[in-house]
Image (cartoon, helix red, strand yellow):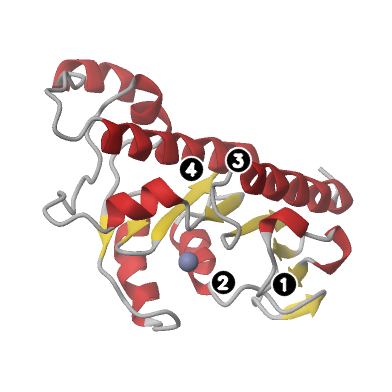
Amino acid sequence: MSEAKQREAICTIGASIFARGEGSSGNISVTTEDGWLMTPTGSSLGRLDPARLSKLGPDGRLVSGDPPTKESFLHRVMYEERPKTGAVVHLHSTHSVAVSCLAGIDPEDVLPPITAYYVMRVGRLPLVPYFRPGDLALASAGRSFAGKHHALLLANHGPVVAGSDLDAAVNAIEELEETAKLYLLLRGAKIRYLTPAQVKELMQ
Ligand SMILES: [Zn+2]
């Protein structure tokens, strides 16, 4: 895909995430032939301008466009630990953030296997401990999970998902958000989760 098309794709997907109310202040990045494209700091996903996206070189420095999101380090961690990553999406989407604030969730696998698509697109979701905004200790905490997991949930903050391309990353983070919503809807109810055998079949 040409860089112009990649720029359009980021803005189109940002607008669609915004339209669905899944968070205006998240951020998106994709790999290009010579570095990365990333959403700029302070930008709303609903009003991205293709020409102003941050273009970063192979060393991560700004080549053109507006300065990148202050959360660019989260994206770097995913690309560095998962070499086949083509795109990373991080959202402050309401239901996923709500789940990330619950006491007593399993930090090794936050959401139970409610649906097949969740198991196939997200799988096991670890909770990364809380750090204040801008604390680079969050990068090292995330790094310790990123090699084994393409989807992470940051405590009291939101999800970060890596994919082979932008569609894969977006599909997975949307499945995560929908599953978080279902999980909250079903709290207190007796739930029939997928069995370990059913989960194993999907993982293969
Ligand atoms: Zn964030």
Q: Residue at x 75, y 70 (%)?
A: 54
Q: Earlier in the sequence, mark 1 or mark 4?
A: 1
In this picture, residue 155 sits left or right of residue 120: left
Image coords of residue 165 (percent x, y): 62, 42
Q: Looking at the image, which is closer to me, 178 or 150? A: 178
Instruction: Name the mark nearer the viewer: 3 or 1.
Output: 3
Q: Which residue is mark 4?
A: 173
Q: Looking at the image, which is closer to me, 94 or 38? A: 94
Residue 56 is marked as 1
Residue 20 is marked as 3
Q: CA distance from mark 3 to mark 4?
A: 13 Å
Image coords of residue 134 (percent x, y): 45, 82
Few, some or many residues within 10 Å of mark 2 (<14, 14–19, 20+)? some
Given contact means CB atoms under 8 Å apart, are the residues at marks 1 and 2 in contact? yes
Given contact means CB atoms under 8 Å apart, are the residues at marks 3 and 4 in contact? no
In this picture, residue 53 sits left or right of residue 98: right
In this picture, residue 197 sits left or right of residue 114: left
Given contact means CB atoms under 8 Å apart, are the residues at marks 1 and 4 in contact? no
Q: Earlier in the sequence, mark 2 or mark 4?
A: 2
Few, some or many residues within 10 Å of mark 3 (<14, 14–19, 20+)? few
Q: Amino acid at mark 3?
A: Arg
Q: Earlier in the sequence, mark 3 or mark 4?
A: 3
Q: Residue at x 15, y 49 (%)?
A: 106
Q: Amino acid at mark 1?
A: Leu
Q: CA distance from mark 1 to mark 4?
A: 24 Å
Judge whether residue 89 can be spotted in this image. yes
Q: Earlier in the sequence, mark 1 or mark 2?
A: 1
User: Is label 1 in a helix, a strand or a loop?
Assistant: strand
Q: Which residue is mark 2?
A: 72
- Mark 2: is the Cβ under 8 angstroms from ligand 1? no
Task: Choose top left, top right, bottom left or bottom right for residue 124.
Answer: top left
Q: CA distance from mark 3 to mark 2?
A: 24 Å
